[in-house]
């Protein structure tokens, strides 16, 4: 019989992280704990359940059949614990504590940074943790509390998320100077969309709007870019058109949390004041 009495959630959390990462070194990074702590917790769980859960290989940790069998139940425990954390966070009445925001690098650095600073100064007991990337971090897994993303026109957030559409981000063709080598990266289907420059070849491949903006500024060529990100560095070559909707997203369980509600409402308000700039009009 398995000895599962008084099982420690932190041990289970390390087990699931190990199943996903396959390496205690990566688990330590993911969970922000030390490598010895991760190893100790995994060993404690194996002792508690009386099973070997991983084979130690030179290539990493290989889950045993017993580990695979335990994983669905452990995931149920994880879902319950995360739900408990969200409910507890939502019940916290204080305007203090962490707010974890995930957004794009462009929105963070070229639009929102002064407003994040103003919010931090107004609420000094709030701790802002901002991560930038192209994907939406999993709000259900508490990897972030709030996400600000530009989503395709007409799309809606996932059913498990609550959100408010704050603004519309416009795009246009941008370049610098009068002669260009061609289009700078991006899907080829965009080359002729409402553009008088559709015959230009795609001579360079620059992945990501930061590289494309720099390449256009250097004179490589043209690219479709968000207006707020391209101006005033680059010259606009076509009329702006809607490129995506800016959403502020949160997990439904956290909608009533005071600090997250204040922060979410502030970000929606700020983004709406930026609508002229997002549309290329300011």
Image (cartoon, helix red, strand yellow):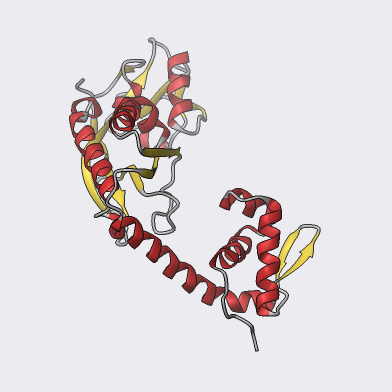
Please tell me in which quadrant of the rendered image residue 81 appears: bottom left
Which residue is pictured at 32% across the width and 28% down the height? 121
Please tell me in which quadrant of the rendered image residue 56 appears: bottom right
Measured as percent of width and height from the top left, residue 157 is found at 29, 54
Which residue is pictured at 56% across the width and 63% down the height? 10
Please tell me in which quadrant of the rendered image residue 171 appears: top left
Name the foreground residue: 213 vs 203: 213
Point out the image quarter for the N terminus. bottom right
Which residue is pictured at 26% across the width and 43% down the height? 264
Name the foreground residue: 206 vs 83: 83
Measured as percent of width and height from the top left, residue 99 is found at 37, 44
Whether residue 272 is visible here, answered yes or no, is yes
Name the foreground residue: 279 vs 73: 73
Measured as percent of width and height from the top left, residue 281 is found at 19, 22
Point out the image quarter for the C terminus. top left
Q: Is residue 235 above or below residue 229?
A: above
Which residue is pictured at 63% across the width and 82% down the height? 3
């Amino acid at each position: 019989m398995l000895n599962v009495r008084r099982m420690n959630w932190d041990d289970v959390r390390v087990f699931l992280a190990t199943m996903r990462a396959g390496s205690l070194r990566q688990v330590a990074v993911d969970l922000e704990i030390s490598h010895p702590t991760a190893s100790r917790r995994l060993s404690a769980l194996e002792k508690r359940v009386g099973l070997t859960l991983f084979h130690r290989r030179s290539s990493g940790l290989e889950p045993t059949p017993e580990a695979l069998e335990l994983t669905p139940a452990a995931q149920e425990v994880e879902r319950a614990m995360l739900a408990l954390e969200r409910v507890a966070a939502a019940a916290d009445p204080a305007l203090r504590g962490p707010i974890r925001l995930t957004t794009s690098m462009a929105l963070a650095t070229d639009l929102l940074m002064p407003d994040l600073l103003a919010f931090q100064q107004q609420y000094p007991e709030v701790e802002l943790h901002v991560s930038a990337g192209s994907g939406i971090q999993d709000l259900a897994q508490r990897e972030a509390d709030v996400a600000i993303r530009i989503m395709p026109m007409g799309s809606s957030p996932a059913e498990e998320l609550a959100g408010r559409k704050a603004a519309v981000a416009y795009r246009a063709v941008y370049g610098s100077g009068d002669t260009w080598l061609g289009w700078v990266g991006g899907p080829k289907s965009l080359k002729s969309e409402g553009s008088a420059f559709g015959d230009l070849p795609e001579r360079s491949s620059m992945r990501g709007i930061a590289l494309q903006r720099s390449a256009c500024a250097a004179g490589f060529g043209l690219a479709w870019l968000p207006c707020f990100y391209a101006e005033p560095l680059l010259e606009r070559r076509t009329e702006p058109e809607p490129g995506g909707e800016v959403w502020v997203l949160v997990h439904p369980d956290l909608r009533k949390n005071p600090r997250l509600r204040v922060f979410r409402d502030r970000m929606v308000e700020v983004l709406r004041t930026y609508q002229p700039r997002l549309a290329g009009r300011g």
